[in-house]
Amino acid sequence: MVDTNVALDVVRLVLAARPLYEAVVKGLKDAEAMRQAVASAIGGINRINRRWIASFLFLSYNCRRGVCFVVDFTRRIELPRVFTKLLLGGASPVGRGPLLDEVVGLAERWLSMMGSSLGVGVLGLGYGDFEVAREVVKAYGSCGARSRERVLDNAIDILLVATALNRGYGFVTTDRRLVCGLYNKIVTGVGQVSGGYVPWGSDLVCLADAELGVGGGVLGAKIYLIHEQCNLQCSERERWC
Amino acid sequence: MEGVDGEVRELVLALYDVFASAFKELYDLVKSFDEDLSRGVVDVDEYYREAEAVVRKIYLDTYYVISRLNEALGRHPEFRVLPNAAFLDALYILPGLLAGVLFRTACGFEGLRRGVVVLLGYSYLGLAGGRPLDAVAFLLASIALARARDDVTAELLRKIGVDLEGIVNFACGAVELAKFLEDRGIGSIPE
């Protein structure tokens, strides 16, 4: 199960390469265009970062033969934010329906494209996933009102973790804050995912175990965290419980 | 290197030697692979083992020299930070950027050329992502595909746990998704 942001990293990398690609297409003689494109990629707002590269590689290697999927995220914040930007910018005509419907419609089209383009399936949430999410909230309730409140503030992300737990799936995320928040109570083990040979490339993917006791049994899932600094030395303040 | 003592100078030169000899070894590996392909006799296992050995040697040599260098530089506060952040950034930003450019280029092609260029893109991406062995394997696989040796390409890719169709579809899928956004005026996705 892949968090939307990991899939968006893949697209970010390709978007960031556009200026240089266009400079190349225009012709290698245009040295100034090339210089500007490289400068923008190195120092600009679309600056490629190591997490995007790690996400691209991780999904390329692991999301084959239909084993990966994203949760239907059209009501989540990331994608509507992308498409809201487009609609408010006036680049796309707004139809008669409410603006939110336009945004969700576009997001749904893009999500369905993502399914076919990246070989990533789309997963709808079920009743059982919400039930497990409630158990997570309950577990944090035993840590006190403040812990419970912090969990509820991150309800959508908690729902994703609960879905992974409910179905026993791996969960790939870039959200270190979420993993650290759950540290101790749900996230129990941390290790390094092997795959790097050099110091600057070996620490981008971390593996954690998630466990939750429910009705006498234990639900478990693997959490893959892709992050620039994912050594998971979570501080006391970062933990929700 | 003015102001730095002889030990540091020696170590910096040793580091240059590591990189120079690594490039030479990789160049020889690729050249010999290409020649074997032309003759029609390629032992993929042997080339993969050789690539592993070169990468391991680069890693160990670099690690050793940089450790020694950091120790030596510790005695020179003015040079304590090496390699600097800009140098490390360049190690992944430029190859990562080139990978993106190659994916965009590749996906404008059809058939064999698409695969050849996507593999080359993955070679840069492997380099950017700290997977030099995979980067070499992708490079060799790209050369093999350019010589229409699909069997050699498939065998090399199997060794690193990917398949040609899967990664071509993935890279071109990413390009397609990016173009969908660009066609609608979105050139970047906020973090």
Image: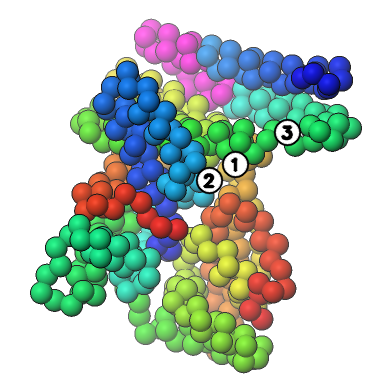
Q: Earlier in the sequence, mark 1 or mark 2?
A: 2
Mark 1 vs mark 3, foreground winner is: 3
**Residue type indicated by callout 1:** Gly
**What is the secondary structure assignment of the residue under circle 1?**
loop
* Residue name at image x 57 percent, y 82 percent: A150
> Are discs 1 and 2 both within one chain?
yes
Give the chain letter at badge 2. A
Residue B90 in picture, x, y percent from top left? 55, 33
Label 1 crowd (10 A; few <14 / some 14-19 / many >=20): many
Q: Is residue A208 above or below residue B98?
A: below
Mark 2: few/some/many CA within 10 Å (<14, 14-19, 20+): many
The secondary structure that most of the magenta stretch takes on is helix
Q: Amino acid at mark 2?
A: Arg
The structure residue drawn at horizontal position 35% and vertical position 80%, both measured from the top left corner, is A126
Q: Is residue A41 above or below residue B5?
A: below
Q: Position of residue A115 (x, y in %)?
A: 28, 57
Residue range of the region highlighted in magenta in the rendering:
B29-51
Q: Pointer 1 indicates a residue of which chain?
A: A
* Secondary element type, mark 2: helix
User: Where in the figure is residue B13, as x and y percent of width and height?
Assistant: 74, 16
Left or right: where B171 falls relative to B48: left
| Same chain shared by disc 1 and disc 3 | no
- Quick check: is B146 in the magenta stretch? no
Residue A101: % across, % down = 20, 74
Please identify the quadrant where the C terminus of chain A is shown. Answer: bottom right
Q: Which residue is mark 2?
A: A50
A73 or B42: which is nearer to us? A73
Give the residue type that dot 3 points to: Leu
Name which quarter of the figure residue A227 lies in. Answer: bottom right
Residue with the mark numbered 3:
B82
Q: Is residue B168 visible?
A: no
Give how far apart the Cα atoms at labels 1 and 3 are.
17 Å
